Image: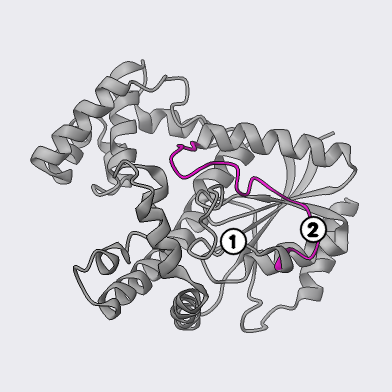
Amino acid sequence: MKTKLICVGGPTAVGKTALSIELAKHFHGQVINGDAMQVYQGLDIGTAKATLDERQGIPHHLLDIRSVDQPYTVADFKRDAESEVEAIEADQDLPILVGGTGLYLESFLFDLSLGGQVEPRPDFRRQMEAFADNHGNQALHQKLVDLDPQAAEKIHPNNVKRVIRALEVGTFSDQLFSQAKETHDDHYSPYDYYFIGLHCDRQRLYERINHRVDLMVDQGLLQEAQWLLDQDLDPKSQSLQSIGYKEVFPYLRGEEDLETSLNRLKRNSRRYAKRQLTWLKNRMDQVHWYNLVEKEDSLATVISDVAAFLEE
Protein backbone atom coordinates (compact mmCIF):
# COMPACT_ATOMS: atom_id res chain seq x y z
CA MET A 1 0.00 0.00 0.00
CA LYS A 2 1.32 3.42 -0.94
CA THR A 3 2.06 5.95 1.77
CA LYS A 4 -0.54 8.71 1.89
CA LEU A 5 0.74 12.26 2.09
CA ILE A 6 -0.35 15.83 1.49
CA CYS A 7 1.48 18.37 -0.68
CA VAL A 8 0.87 22.10 -0.48
CA GLY A 9 2.21 24.22 -3.34
CA GLY A 10 1.65 27.60 -4.87
CA PRO A 11 3.27 31.00 -5.32
CA THR A 12 5.07 32.93 -2.64
CA ALA A 13 2.89 34.86 -0.16
CA VAL A 14 -0.26 32.86 -0.90
CA GLY A 15 -0.51 31.20 2.53
CA LYS A 16 1.13 27.79 2.13
CA THR A 17 2.80 27.80 5.55
CA ALA A 18 -0.35 28.76 7.44
CA LEU A 19 -2.42 26.10 5.69
CA SER A 20 0.16 23.36 6.26
CA ILE A 21 0.17 24.09 9.98
CA GLU A 22 -3.63 24.04 10.17
CA LEU A 23 -3.69 20.69 8.35
CA ALA A 24 -1.01 19.29 10.62
CA LYS A 25 -2.99 20.33 13.70
CA HIS A 26 -6.19 18.79 12.37
CA PHE A 27 -4.77 15.53 11.01
CA HIS A 28 -1.90 14.89 13.42
CA GLY A 29 0.66 15.71 10.79
CA GLN A 30 4.28 16.71 10.53
CA VAL A 31 5.56 19.26 8.03
CA ILE A 32 8.42 18.67 5.58
CA ASN A 33 9.94 21.79 4.06
CA GLY A 34 10.03 21.82 0.26
CA ASP A 35 11.65 25.22 -0.19
CA ALA A 36 15.20 25.26 -1.52
CA MET A 37 16.38 28.20 0.59
CA GLN A 38 14.72 27.40 3.91
CA VAL A 39 17.22 24.57 4.37
CA TYR A 40 19.84 27.20 5.25
CA GLN A 41 20.67 28.22 8.79
CA GLY A 42 20.44 31.95 9.36
CA LEU A 43 18.24 32.67 6.37
CA ASP A 44 14.95 33.17 8.17
CA ILE A 45 13.34 36.49 7.32
CA GLY A 46 14.21 36.62 3.63
CA THR A 47 12.97 33.08 3.03
CA ALA A 48 9.74 33.60 5.02
CA LYS A 49 10.65 30.64 7.21
CA ALA A 50 7.98 29.86 9.80
CA THR A 51 9.00 31.10 13.23
CA LEU A 52 8.88 28.82 16.26
CA ASP A 53 5.71 30.59 17.40
CA GLU A 54 4.09 30.18 13.98
CA ARG A 55 4.88 26.46 13.98
CA GLN A 56 2.65 26.06 17.06
CA GLY A 57 4.53 23.01 18.26
CA ILE A 58 4.10 21.14 14.97
CA PRO A 59 7.26 19.19 14.05
CA HIS A 60 8.99 20.71 11.01
CA HIS A 61 11.65 18.88 9.03
CA LEU A 62 14.39 19.93 6.58
CA LEU A 63 14.65 23.43 7.99
CA ASP A 64 18.08 24.77 9.00
CA ILE A 65 19.96 21.64 7.89
CA ARG A 66 22.74 23.36 5.91
CA SER A 67 25.16 26.19 6.61
CA VAL A 68 25.15 28.93 4.01
CA ASP A 69 28.47 27.81 2.51
CA GLN A 70 27.12 24.36 1.62
CA PRO A 71 25.28 23.30 -1.55
CA TYR A 72 21.96 21.48 -1.42
CA THR A 73 20.80 19.66 -4.53
CA VAL A 74 17.54 18.21 -5.76
CA ALA A 75 19.04 14.76 -5.15
CA ASP A 76 19.84 15.76 -1.56
CA PHE A 77 16.27 16.90 -1.03
CA LYS A 78 14.78 13.77 -2.56
CA ARG A 79 16.89 11.54 -0.33
CA ASP A 80 16.20 13.57 2.82
CA ALA A 81 12.46 13.91 2.15
CA GLU A 82 12.08 10.17 1.57
CA SER A 83 13.81 9.52 4.89
CA GLU A 84 11.56 12.01 6.71
CA VAL A 85 8.40 10.50 5.21
CA GLU A 86 9.45 7.05 6.43
CA ALA A 87 10.10 8.40 9.94
CA ILE A 88 6.80 10.29 10.05
CA GLU A 89 4.92 7.22 8.86
CA ALA A 90 6.63 5.20 11.59
CA ASP A 91 5.24 7.75 14.07
CA GLN A 92 1.80 7.08 12.53
CA ASP A 93 1.53 10.75 11.62
CA LEU A 94 0.58 12.35 8.30
CA PRO A 95 3.46 13.70 6.17
CA ILE A 96 2.71 17.18 4.81
CA LEU A 97 5.15 18.43 2.19
CA VAL A 98 4.99 22.19 1.69
CA GLY A 99 7.02 24.57 -0.41
CA GLY A 100 7.36 26.73 -3.46
CA THR A 101 10.27 24.97 -5.15
CA GLY A 102 8.36 23.05 -7.81
CA LEU A 103 11.37 21.03 -8.92
CA TYR A 104 11.75 19.65 -5.39
CA LEU A 105 8.11 18.63 -5.16
CA GLU A 106 8.06 17.07 -8.61
CA SER A 107 11.31 15.14 -8.21
CA PHE A 108 10.10 13.72 -4.90
CA LEU A 109 6.61 12.76 -6.03
CA PHE A 110 7.54 11.29 -9.39
CA ASP A 111 11.07 9.98 -8.93
CA LEU A 112 12.30 12.59 -11.39
CA SER A 113 15.85 11.75 -12.36
CA LEU A 114 16.85 15.05 -14.01
CA GLY A 115 19.82 13.33 -15.49
CA GLY A 116 20.86 12.34 -11.99
CA GLN A 117 22.79 9.32 -13.22
CA VAL A 118 25.50 11.68 -14.47
CA GLU A 119 28.00 12.53 -11.76
CA PRO A 120 28.95 16.21 -11.45
CA ARG A 121 32.06 17.15 -13.40
CA PRO A 122 33.70 20.02 -11.47
CA ASP A 123 36.29 20.75 -14.16
CA PHE A 124 33.60 20.94 -16.85
CA ARG A 125 31.45 23.20 -14.69
CA ARG A 126 34.33 25.57 -14.02
CA GLN A 127 35.09 25.65 -17.73
CA MET A 128 31.48 26.53 -18.57
CA GLU A 129 31.29 29.14 -15.79
CA ALA A 130 34.43 30.76 -17.16
CA PHE A 131 32.93 30.71 -20.65
CA ALA A 132 29.80 32.47 -19.36
CA ASP A 133 31.90 35.04 -17.51
CA ASN A 134 33.95 35.78 -20.62
CA HIS A 135 31.31 35.56 -23.35
CA GLY A 136 28.00 36.08 -21.54
CA ASN A 137 25.03 33.94 -20.51
CA GLN A 138 23.47 34.10 -23.97
CA ALA A 139 26.57 32.60 -25.58
CA LEU A 140 26.56 29.78 -23.04
CA HIS A 141 22.87 29.19 -23.69
CA GLN A 142 23.60 28.98 -27.42
CA LYS A 143 25.79 25.96 -26.68
CA LEU A 144 22.71 24.30 -25.20
CA VAL A 145 20.61 25.35 -28.20
CA ASP A 146 23.11 23.56 -30.43
CA LEU A 147 23.31 20.46 -28.22
CA ASP A 148 19.75 20.08 -26.90
CA PRO A 149 17.25 22.60 -28.34
CA GLN A 150 14.31 21.16 -26.39
CA ALA A 151 16.09 21.71 -23.08
CA ALA A 152 17.24 25.16 -24.20
CA GLU A 153 13.66 26.17 -24.91
CA LYS A 154 12.68 25.47 -21.29
CA ILE A 155 15.74 26.87 -19.50
CA HIS A 156 16.25 30.63 -19.30
CA PRO A 157 19.70 31.86 -20.41
CA ASN A 158 20.20 33.56 -17.04
CA ASN A 159 19.71 30.28 -15.19
CA VAL A 160 23.40 29.53 -15.70
CA LYS A 161 23.57 26.71 -13.18
CA ARG A 162 20.73 24.87 -14.93
CA VAL A 163 22.17 25.48 -18.40
CA ILE A 164 25.50 24.04 -17.30
CA ARG A 165 23.81 20.99 -15.79
CA ALA A 166 21.93 20.37 -19.04
CA LEU A 167 25.18 20.67 -20.98
CA GLU A 168 26.86 18.33 -18.52
CA VAL A 169 24.19 15.65 -18.90
CA GLY A 170 24.13 15.93 -22.68
CA THR A 171 27.91 15.81 -22.94
CA PHE A 172 28.70 12.99 -20.53
CA SER A 173 25.72 10.64 -20.86
CA ASP A 174 24.06 8.63 -23.59
CA GLN A 175 20.93 10.78 -23.51
CA LEU A 176 20.12 14.47 -23.64
CA PHE A 177 18.89 16.40 -20.63
CA SER A 178 15.48 16.89 -22.26
CA GLN A 179 15.19 13.12 -22.72
CA ALA A 180 16.14 12.49 -19.11
CA LYS A 181 13.41 14.85 -17.98
CA GLU A 182 10.80 12.99 -19.99
CA THR A 183 11.28 9.74 -18.09
CA HIS A 184 8.63 10.77 -15.55
CA ASP A 185 5.92 11.72 -18.01
CA ASP A 186 3.64 8.86 -17.08
CA HIS A 187 3.50 10.59 -13.68
CA TYR A 188 3.70 7.37 -11.73
CA SER A 189 4.26 8.17 -8.09
CA PRO A 190 5.34 5.81 -5.32
CA TYR A 191 3.07 7.87 -3.04
CA ASP A 192 -0.68 8.26 -2.75
CA TYR A 193 -0.74 12.05 -2.59
CA TYR A 194 -3.29 14.84 -2.42
CA PHE A 195 -1.79 17.96 -3.99
CA ILE A 196 -3.23 21.26 -2.81
CA GLY A 197 -2.51 24.22 -5.08
CA LEU A 198 -3.14 27.64 -3.58
CA HIS A 199 -3.90 30.62 -5.80
CA CYS A 200 -5.67 33.96 -5.80
CA ASP A 201 -6.29 36.94 -8.04
CA ARG A 202 -2.99 38.11 -9.53
CA GLN A 203 -3.33 41.73 -8.44
CA ARG A 204 -4.24 40.66 -4.91
CA LEU A 205 -1.23 38.32 -4.84
CA TYR A 206 1.09 41.09 -6.01
CA GLU A 207 -0.24 43.36 -3.26
CA ARG A 208 0.46 40.64 -0.69
CA ILE A 209 3.99 40.19 -2.05
CA ASN A 210 4.70 43.93 -1.85
CA HIS A 211 3.36 44.06 1.69
CA ARG A 212 5.43 41.03 2.68
CA VAL A 213 8.62 42.71 1.48
CA ASP A 214 7.85 45.80 3.56
CA LEU A 215 7.15 43.58 6.55
CA MET A 216 10.42 41.68 6.05
CA VAL A 217 12.33 44.96 6.14
CA ASP A 218 10.61 45.88 9.40
CA GLN A 219 11.53 42.47 10.81
CA GLY A 220 15.24 42.84 10.01
CA LEU A 221 15.78 41.68 6.43
CA LEU A 222 18.59 44.15 5.81
CA GLN A 223 20.50 43.02 8.88
CA GLU A 224 20.07 39.38 7.83
CA ALA A 225 21.30 40.18 4.32
CA GLN A 226 24.30 42.04 5.75
CA TRP A 227 25.14 38.99 7.85
CA LEU A 228 25.01 36.84 4.72
CA LEU A 229 27.30 39.26 2.87
CA ASP A 230 29.73 39.19 5.77
CA GLN A 231 30.17 35.42 5.40
CA ASP A 232 32.45 36.18 2.42
CA LEU A 233 31.07 33.30 0.38
CA ASP A 234 31.95 32.29 -3.15
CA PRO A 235 29.80 34.54 -5.39
CA LYS A 236 28.32 31.43 -6.99
CA SER A 237 27.22 29.95 -3.63
CA GLN A 238 23.67 28.68 -3.72
CA SER A 239 22.60 30.65 -0.66
CA LEU A 240 23.58 33.93 -2.35
CA GLN A 241 21.16 33.30 -5.20
CA SER A 242 18.03 33.51 -3.08
CA ILE A 243 15.42 36.09 -3.95
CA GLY A 244 15.22 38.28 -0.87
CA TYR A 245 18.92 38.84 -0.39
CA LYS A 246 20.71 39.41 -3.70
CA GLU A 247 18.35 42.27 -4.53
CA VAL A 248 19.43 44.33 -1.50
CA PHE A 249 23.16 43.62 -1.74
CA PRO A 250 23.74 46.69 -3.98
CA TYR A 251 22.17 48.91 -1.29
CA LEU A 252 24.29 47.33 1.43
CA ARG A 253 27.41 47.91 -0.67
CA GLY A 254 26.48 51.58 -1.05
CA GLU A 255 25.86 51.24 -4.78
CA GLU A 256 22.23 52.43 -4.84
CA ASP A 257 19.46 53.73 -2.60
CA LEU A 258 17.17 51.50 -0.56
CA GLU A 259 14.04 52.27 -2.58
CA THR A 260 15.68 51.01 -5.78
CA SER A 261 16.75 47.76 -4.10
CA LEU A 262 13.35 47.15 -2.55
CA ASN A 263 11.53 47.85 -5.80
CA ARG A 264 13.76 45.27 -7.47
CA LEU A 265 13.02 42.78 -4.70
CA LYS A 266 9.28 43.28 -5.08
CA ARG A 267 9.49 42.96 -8.86
CA ASN A 268 11.61 39.80 -8.72
CA SER A 269 9.31 38.28 -6.11
CA ARG A 270 6.29 38.94 -8.32
CA ARG A 271 8.04 37.38 -11.30
CA TYR A 272 9.01 34.38 -9.20
CA ALA A 273 5.40 33.92 -8.10
CA LYS A 274 4.33 33.90 -11.73
CA ARG A 275 6.95 31.23 -12.53
CA GLN A 276 5.82 29.14 -9.56
CA LEU A 277 2.23 29.12 -10.82
CA THR A 278 3.31 28.35 -14.37
CA TRP A 279 5.36 25.42 -13.13
CA LEU A 280 2.45 23.93 -11.21
CA LYS A 281 0.04 24.31 -14.09
CA ASN A 282 2.44 22.93 -16.71
CA ARG A 283 4.29 20.22 -14.79
CA MET A 284 1.84 18.88 -12.23
CA ASP A 285 -1.42 17.09 -12.83
CA GLN A 286 -4.07 16.17 -10.27
CA VAL A 287 -3.72 19.50 -8.48
CA HIS A 288 -6.70 20.51 -6.34
CA TRP A 289 -6.88 24.30 -6.50
CA TYR A 290 -8.13 26.47 -3.64
CA ASN A 291 -8.43 30.22 -3.19
CA LEU A 292 -8.28 30.89 0.53
CA VAL A 293 -7.02 34.46 0.24
CA GLU A 294 -10.23 35.80 -1.26
CA LYS A 295 -12.33 33.21 0.56
CA GLU A 296 -13.67 31.61 -2.62
CA ASP A 297 -12.87 28.44 -0.69
CA SER A 298 -12.75 27.91 3.05
CA LEU A 299 -10.34 26.12 5.35
CA ALA A 300 -13.24 23.85 6.28
CA THR A 301 -13.59 22.83 2.63
CA VAL A 302 -9.91 21.93 2.38
CA ILE A 303 -10.08 19.93 5.61
CA SER A 304 -13.19 18.11 4.40
CA ASP A 305 -11.56 17.24 1.07
CA VAL A 306 -8.36 16.02 2.73
CA ALA A 307 -10.39 13.93 5.18
CA ALA A 308 -12.23 12.30 2.28
CA PHE A 309 -8.89 11.55 0.59
CA LEU A 310 -7.47 9.97 3.74
CA GLU A 311 -10.53 7.76 4.09
CA GLU A 312 -10.23 6.38 0.55
Which residue corresponds to the image point at 55% horizontal and 60% vertical from the top-left? 44
Report the residue marked by disc 1: 49
Query: Percent position (x, y) of residue 2?
Result: 80, 36
User: Closer to the camera, 20 or 299?
Assistant: 20
Tell whether position 167 is magenta.
no
Question: For numbered disc 1, what is the local secondary structure?
Answer: loop
Q: Is 306 situated above or below 296?
A: above
Q: Is 55 situated above or below 60?
A: below
Tell whether position 63 is magenta.
yes
Report the residue marked by disc 2: 58
Q: Residues within 10 Å of mark 2 (few under 14, many from 20)?
A: some
Q: Quadrant of residue 167?
A: top left
Q: Is 305 situated above or below 132?
A: below
Which residue corresponds to the image point at 62% horizontal and 84% vertical from the top-left? 294
Q: Quick check: 28 left or right of 188?
A: right
Q: Quick check: 132 left or right of 201?
A: left
Query: Percent position (x, y) of residue 186?
Result: 58, 36
Q: Quick check: 144 left or right of 92?
A: left
Which span of residues is magenta-colored?
Answer: 54-73
> Which of the marked residues, 2 or 1, is nearer the chain's N terminus?
1
Q: Residues within 10 Å of mark 1 (few under 14, many from 20)?
A: some
User: Closer to the camera, 197 or 213?
Assistant: 213
Name the kind of residue labelled 1 in the image. Lys
User: Closer to the camera, 282 or 244?
Assistant: 244
Can residue 187 be seen in this snapshot?
no
Question: For numbered disc 2, what is the local secondary structure?
Answer: loop
Q: Is 273 situated above or below 178?
A: below
Name the kind of residue labelled 2 in the image. Ile
Q: Quick check: 151 left or right of 95?
A: left
Q: Main secondary structure of the magenta part?
A: loop
